[in-house]
Image (tube, helix red, strand yellow):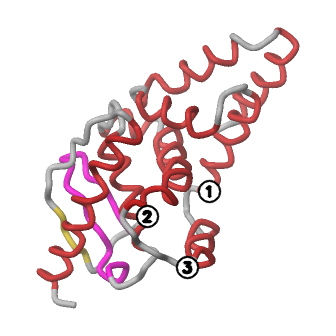
Amino acid sequence: MQGSDAEAQVHAELEQIMPLISTLTGLPTRWSGMVEIVETLEFKGKKRFSCDIQIQASLVRQNVRWSTLIHESLHAHSAGYNGSDYRLYRGWEEGVVEQLQRLLRPEILSRLLVVVAEADLLEADRQHPFNDRVQALEAIHRCLAVPQTAFYKQLLATPIAQRPVETLRQIQQLPVLEQRSAFYVYLREP
């Protein structure tokens, strides 16, 4: 696929994904509308702080690209997405976005009438570089009496730098005996 064809394809797919994520999260997108297909990229995708989205060229032809497109689209909806907060609280952004991508992906793909082999998606999930961040947040989530998707949507709507404090606030609302174990998990994670 030629560079301009690949960019047009990814652009069209992102244009379909963005309004769905806005609807599902209640958050506006800040995507610039710009897409860049990059031959060499540290990750499969990247949402730059300018709100442009970069996608690795080799991924464009793979069906599992949908996971990356949803992931990068969620960054475009993330509250307080800026370079300094991202660098300080990277796990609080990447873990939230990746787990929410996994939770929302079935509905997004269904609404777009996109079929991707579940085994391929699960294998890509298994190999994801931010799994440690997802596991850390899941450990915290399990301590709270909050539905899983609601937990991650609420974190996405909270500015990145405030996510640890917001999570601690939720822990403090637990019964006293549960606070101790939840606080212990909180201190070890992400």
Residue 117 painted magenta: no
- Give whichever of discs 3 and 2 has the lower sequence position: 2
Residue 147, label in figure: none
- How many numbered discs sit on the rendered protein? 3
Separation of marks 3 and 2 at Cα, in angstroms: 11 Å
CA–CA distance in space, label 3 to label 1:
21 Å
Comparing labels 2 and 1, the label whose residue is closer to the camera = 2
Identify the magenta region: 44-60
| Image disc number at residue 109 | 2
Residue 184 drawn at (x, y percent):
79, 26
Quarter-wise, where is residue 8 in the image? bottom left
| Helix, strand or loop under label 1 | helix
Circle 3 crowding by C-alpha within 10 Å: few under 14, some 14–19, many from 20: few
Q: What's the residue type where badge 2 is placed?
A: Leu
Q: Quadrant of the N terminus?
A: bottom left
For image coordinates 49% across by 31% down, the residue present is 155
Where does residue 81 sit, x and y in percent of width and height?
Answer: 32, 37
Q: Which residue is mark 3?
A: 117
CA distance separating discs 2 and 1: 22 Å
Q: Is 164 or 142 nearer to us in this picture?
A: 142
